[in-house]
Amino acid sequence: MFALVDCNSFFASCEQVFRPDLADSPVVVLSNNDGCVVARSAEAKALGIKMAGPWHEVPRELAAKVTVFSSNYTLYGDFSRRVLATLSRFAQDIENYSIDESFLEFLPGPDWAALGADIRRTVRRHTGIPVSVGFGPTKVLSKIANKVAKRRKEAGGVFVLRDDAEAEAVLATMTTDDVWGIGSRLAARLETVGVKTALDLKRLNEEAARRLLTVVGQRIVLELRGVSCLAIEDVAPAKQNICTAKSF
């Protein structure tokens, strides 16, 4: 079983740890040059503040309701290391996938929901950072489970995909771009052949998946079927990006 532990509104949560008076208040973190929104607390999301939007376009009366911080990546990196150190108490095989996400791999046996609740409590107690935990038999399915853990309040921040029937019920409610590794461009390509939901993608013929999405897409389809193709990596994959900034 794999677990994906994802820090909720990570940058904003880090700032709230040092400002406990802002624990239930709308908080926004801006990019390096204070140009765009890069993190929002749940309360800021509820106000309708958009992710990646230029801050100067936010209406003045709305901006007045929000506490705004400039990015502090030294702080966020330190918190990331603390969260990872706490997670290492629960599993030996861990992949620190990004600054706020980690995959954990477990042998069968535990009560997954209870384990997830314990992870959430311990990380919150040790670091002050709230996390969501999703469990699944593959890394892709654990990502799906984590989305459900965040979206469904009744889940309490933990969701477990225990079997294929439960996975299919969840996948039927999600679009293809909800699947890890399928962006908007690939989702549009899939829609041209009638693949609209994550469940449609799971049921896609392997040959067609390879033709449309290359071997990477074929592995995603297999992972959605519960066949583990992506192992835990000791070092997070190198990510090379071209950044297009929206501010001068």
Image (cartoon, grey):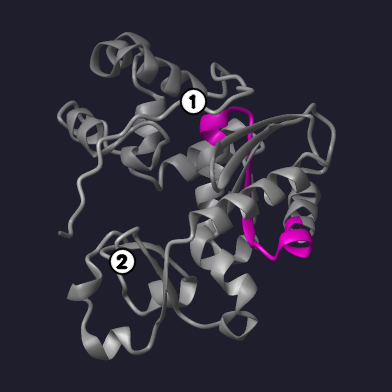
- Relative to 172, does residue 151 appear above or below in the rendering? below
Q: Residues within 10 Å of mark 1 (few under 14, many from 20)?
A: few
The magenta stretch is 123-141
Q: Residue at x 20, y 45 (%)?
A: 244
Residue 237, label in figure: 1
Residue 60, label in figure: none
Tell me where residue 3 sits by quadrant.
top right
Q: Give the residue at mark 2.
A: 34
Classify the position of the C terminus by image quarter: bottom left
Q: Is residue 89 left or right of residue 78?
A: right
Q: Is residue 131 magenta?
A: yes
Of the residues under marks 2 and 1, which one precedes in the sequence? 2
The location of residue 73, given as percent across then percent down, is 49, 54
Q: Is residue 143 left or right of residue 214?
A: right
Between the C-alphas of marks 2 and 1, the distance is 28 Å
Residue type at tag 2: Asp
Residue type at tag 1: Pro
Q: Is residue 135 left or right of residue 194?
A: right
The location of residue 203, given as percent across then percent down, is 39, 24
The location of residue 201, given as percent across then percent down, is 35, 28
Q: Is residue 129 magenta?
A: yes
Q: Residue at x 23, y 77 (%)?
A: 58
Tell me where residue 246 sits by quadrant.
bottom left
Q: Residue at x 55, y 59 (%)?
A: 8
